[in-house]
Image (spheres, coloured by chain):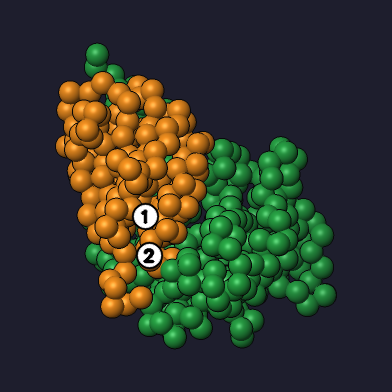
Chain colours: A green, B orange
């Protein structure tokens, strides 16, 4: 069991701790402590925007700019949790970063709406069929072209920037709520972890999806049901997680010379 | 290869999405569940990326998709000179475990043109389940 490793902890912010720190502002130490408390969340959010050609370190910097703004503007008397406010501000800052660079991460409304319809319909059809539907079956049920379903699936992939505070299930739970504790049976990940230490640094939900897909052999739809998100959401988590791992395995500056050296 | 769709991209990771999109487009022709379609898409992405990282100096990556007899077959090949394929490193890698975990069968061999390749197979739904 290696779950005690640094970085494998929760991405939650302890709002009561942070609230006490806000009372000590403008004390510089208190501000620094709030920043420190929020680092796992900042890194988690930055990672969600990784794989778009921007170094992760830069994205963490961007998230931190958002974080500092959030600390300056946060008003504890308004009854909003700091974690909620900070996450929204950091995501906003990250999105703006990409927008400023002229990169489109906006998905056309038509596809967003189709994506939502697919998300709503999937559990229903899956239950009827006893398996997840084919693209053709989905298109028939939605009365759209297969091509549109494919487009919506692709768009859902690109749109991996959904706010962490957007409700993802009926009872109003948010993505942050579902980042639960690490499953004890994840020990079998050890072998993978020895190959890719980055697995240890994955947020626990990402580890869980990886585990369920590759060790338990669940389908994406089954995982979706188990962790209470949509199939498309699982698809995104999986794609993003694999990308993170892949990036972590690629020869870095230190490894490059050695890996390709001998003529 | 009458039913084969082939695309070639420069060896640029930024273009892997073209392979992903094509894979989904072709996979939609088969009775594959969207879970399966998504798995094969991820597998193609990983395979192309594995070829790029394991065999530096590639001049092109080719994806050939074949849907004969209700089975999705994806062959990802790299235009590169190499004596050894598959590399022992590939078969021991995490990426290979991921690839084999996503599809019904994965092999690393040379394709018909003697290029290093990764072949992926995903079976469509059995007729009884359609």
Binning the other alpha carbons within 10 Å of mark 1 as few (below 14), some (14 to 19) or many (20 upward) gives: many
Q: Which residue is mark 1?
A: B40
- Helix, strand or loop for disc 1: helix
Q: Quadrant for the N terminus of chain B, please.
A: top left
Q: Using the rendered view, name the quadrant where residue A121 is placed.
A: bottom right
Q: Quadrant of the C terminus of chain B?
A: bottom left
- Comparing B96 with A19, the one in front is B96
Q: Answer with the quarter of the image where residue A171 lies.
A: bottom right
Which mark is nearer the camera, 1 or 2?
A: 2
Q: Is residue B52 above or below residue A7?
A: above
**Tag 2: Cα neighbours inside 10 Å, few (<14), some, or many (≥20)?**
many
Whole-number angstrom distance, CA of label 1 to CA of label 2: 10 Å
Q: Which numbered circle lies on residue B77? A: none
Q: Secondary structure at mark 2?
A: loop
Proximity of marks 1 and 2: CB atoms separated by less than 8 Å: yes
- Residue A30 location in percent, x, y? 69, 59
């Amino acid at each position: 069991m290696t779950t005690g490793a640094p970085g494998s902890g929760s991405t939650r912010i302890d709002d009561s701790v942070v609230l006490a720190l806000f009372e000590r502002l403008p004390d510089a130490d208190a501000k620094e402590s709030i920043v420190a408390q929020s680092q796992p969340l900042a890194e988690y959010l930055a990672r969600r925007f990784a794989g778009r050609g921007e170094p992760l370190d830069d994205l963490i910097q961007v998230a931190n700019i958002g974080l500092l703004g959030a600390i300056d503007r946060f008003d504890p008397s308004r009854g909003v949790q700091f974690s909620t406010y900070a996450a929204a501000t950091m995501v906003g800052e990250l999105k703006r970063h990409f927008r400023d660079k002229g990169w489109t991460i906006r998905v056309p409304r038509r596809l967003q709406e189709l994506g939502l319809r697919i998300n709503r319909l999937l559990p229903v059809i899956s239950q009827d069929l006893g398996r997840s539907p084919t693209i053709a079956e989905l298109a028939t049920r939605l009365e759209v072209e297969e091509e549109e379903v494919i487009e919506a699936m692709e768009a859902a992939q690109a749109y991996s920037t959904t706010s962490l505070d957007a409700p993802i299930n009926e009872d109003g739970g948010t993505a942050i709520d579902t980042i639960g504790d690490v499953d004890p049976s994840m020990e079998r990940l050890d072998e993978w972890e020895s190959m890719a230490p980055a697995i240890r640094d994955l947020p626990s939900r990402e580890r869980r999806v990886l585990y369920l897909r590759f060790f338990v052999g669940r389908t994406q739809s089954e995982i979706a049901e188990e962790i209470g998100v949509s199939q498309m959401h699982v698809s995104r988590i999986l794609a993003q997680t694999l990308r993170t791992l892949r990036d972590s395995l690629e020869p870095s500056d230190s490894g490059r010379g050695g890996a390709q050296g001998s003529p | 290869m009458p039913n084969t769709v082939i695309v070639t991209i420069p060896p640029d990771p930024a273009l892997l999405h073209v392979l992903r999109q094509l894979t989904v487009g072709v996979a939609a022709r088969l009775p594959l569940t969207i879970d399966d379609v998504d798995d094969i898409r991820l597998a193609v992405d990983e395979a192309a990326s594995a070829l790029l990282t394991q065999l530096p100096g590639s001049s092109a990556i080719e994806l050939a998709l074949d849907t004969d007899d209700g089975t999705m077959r994806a062959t990802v090949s790299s235009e590169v000179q190499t004596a050894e394929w598959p590399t022992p490193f590939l078969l021991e890698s995490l990426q290979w475990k991921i690839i084999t975990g996503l599809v019904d069968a994965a092999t690393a061999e040379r394709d018909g043109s003697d290029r290093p390749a990764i072949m992926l197979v995903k079976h469509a739904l059995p007729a009884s389940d359609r």
